[in-house]
Image (cartoon, rainbow, N blue to C red):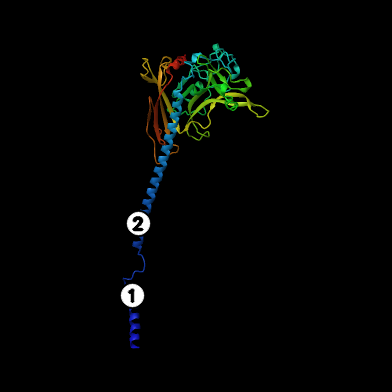
């Protein structure tokens, strides 16, 4: 009993001592809590800063990648067209191509050596150029089909200048920024592989209805249209080939998808066949077409602010460019051997943490500073013109 009483007394003493001891830890002090919060904020801020930096770098890399892809595609597309300038199938030059508007070679025996005029091939919307006005003396009044000027360049054009020279380009759509005007480039040629119309299937012929071709036997040629309404039966002779006729006019449009979206983009006009009359009887095929020089749907590449082309002139007939000109004279044009393409591309979106105050050199011109928030780069490429002998017709320009 005495022992139990002593034990109870000791326990009560220990409890009282613990409650009175100043060394017992009952929680965090204010200083400790403030230090912990500060350390937490530092760690959180560091992690968040790394996250923001990584996200911004990723977004910037994506922007630069898209810009490079668009610029390279734009250059590749224009280079492909430039390489074909002056190519007229098996013909040596455009002088042997009939300039009158025509639908079909009259008989298999003629094989395009005698072409009958058919004025119904005129375009509803042409792209008349003052550099190459209509030649009424040869019964030719449609610029889009005139092969005598296979390439035309209008450097650093204003919207009014572009519309005056190429009337299918509206002033409201042309990219016109004072001090930063772009070029207009028109290219005509035939492309693809020449085909014998006589060996095509009915399905293949229907797919080509309304399209424009150069029909040639290697000596004489004519611009024709596949049109069932004008009985193009496709039997001009086994040694006659039809080549797809191409007319492209490149320019910078001041919007990409919707007017006012503010995204400069490379666009081009092309020959477009629109069905105007369908056969009321099955299979309801198109039996008549209208042709226009109109803008291709979707454009070539967005984010292209400026392109510039300078032409290499061979003045001593050794096949090598002796000098480059943005506006070659009529004499210079007959010696065209190369072309340098410059493209100024900008990022799709603005980077508000960046200010672009740089200038950019594109051959013989300088663009900028823009003093905005878009990243930009200059891309360039040199194209060898494959058909310099056929480009002698360019001496007609400027006359």
Decide if residue 259 is on the left or right side of residue 287. Answer: left
Point out residue 165 in the picture as x, y percentages from the top left corner: 50, 21
* Quarter-of-image position of residue 64: top left
Q: Quadrant of residue 3?
A: bottom left
Residue 113 screen position, x and y as percent: 55, 13
Residue at the disc numbered 1: 18
Tell me if mark 1 has few (under 14), some (14-19) or many (20+) residues whose alpha carbon lies within 10 angstroms of its own: few
Q: Residue at horizontal 39%, vertical 33%?
A: 377
Q: Is 378 rendered above or below residue 99?
A: below
Packing grade of label 2 (10 A; few <14, some 14-19, many >=20) is few
Local SS, label 2:
helix
Q: Is residue 91 left or right of residue 202?
A: left
Name the one closer to the observer, 114 or 85.
114
Asked if disc 1 and disc 2 are in contact, CB closer than 8 Å, the reply is: no
What residue is rendered at 48% in x and 26% in y?
250
Tell me residue 129's x, y (percent).
Answer: 51, 19
The answer to which quarter of the image holds residue 346 is top left
Residue highlighted by disc 2: 39
- Residue 37 horizontal side relative to residue 280, left or right: left
Q: In this rendered view, identify the residue nearer to me: 34 or 113.
A: 113
For label 1, the SS is helix
Q: CA gap, disc 1 to disc 2?
A: 33 Å
The single residue placed furthest to the right in the displayed view is 281
Relative placement, left or right, of 65 versus 210 is left
């Amino acid at each position: 009993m005495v022992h139990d009483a002593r034990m109870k007394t000791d326990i009560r003493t220990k409890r009282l001592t613990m409650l009175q001891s100043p060394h017992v830890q009952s929680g965090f002090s204010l200083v400790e809590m403030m230090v912990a919060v500060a350390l937490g904020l530092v760690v959180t801020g560091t992690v968040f800063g790394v996250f923001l930096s990584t996200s911004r770098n990723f977004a910037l890399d994506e922007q630069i990648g898209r810009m490079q892809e668009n610029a390279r595609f734009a250059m590749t597309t224009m280079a492909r067209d430039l390489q074909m300038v002056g190519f007229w199938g098996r013909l040596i030059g455009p002088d042997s191509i009939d300039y009158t508007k025509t639908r079909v070679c009259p008989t298999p025996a003629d094989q395009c050596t005698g072409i009958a005029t058919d004025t119904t091939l005129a375009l509803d919307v042409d792209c008349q150029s003052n550099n190459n006005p209509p030649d009424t003396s040869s019964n030719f009044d449609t610029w889009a089909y005139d092969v005598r000027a296979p390439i035309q360049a209008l450097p650093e054009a204003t919207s009014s200048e572009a519309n005056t020279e190429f009337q299918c380009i509206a002033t409201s759509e042309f990219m016109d920024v004072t001090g930063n005007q772009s070029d207009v480039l028109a290219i005509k040629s035939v492309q693809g592989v020449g085909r014998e119309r006589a060996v095509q299937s009915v399905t293949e012929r229907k797919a080509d209805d309304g399209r424009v071709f150069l029909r040639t036997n290697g000596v004489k040629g004519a611009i024709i249209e596949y049109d069932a309404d004008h009985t193009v039966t496709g039997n001009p002779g086994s040694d006659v080939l039809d080549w797809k006729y191409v007319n492209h006019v490149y320019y910078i449009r001041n919007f990409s998808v919707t007017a006012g979206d503010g995204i400069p983009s490379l666009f081009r006009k092309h020959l477009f066949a629109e069905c105007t009359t369908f056969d009321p009887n099955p299979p309801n095929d198109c039996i008549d077409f209208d042709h226009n020089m109109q803008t291709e749907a979707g454009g070539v590449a967005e984010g292209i602010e400026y392109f510039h082309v300078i032409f290499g002139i061979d003045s001593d007939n050794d096949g090598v460019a002796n000098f480059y000109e943005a506006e070659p004279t009529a004499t210079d044009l007959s010696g065209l051997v190369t072309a340098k393409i410059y493209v100024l591309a900008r990022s799709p979106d603005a980077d508000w943490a960046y200010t672009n105050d740089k200038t950019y050199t594109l051959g013989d011109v300088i663009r900028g500073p823009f003093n905005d928030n878009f990243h930009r780069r200059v891309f360039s490429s040199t194209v060898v013109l494959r058909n310099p002998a056929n480009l002698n017709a360019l001496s007609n320009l400027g006359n």
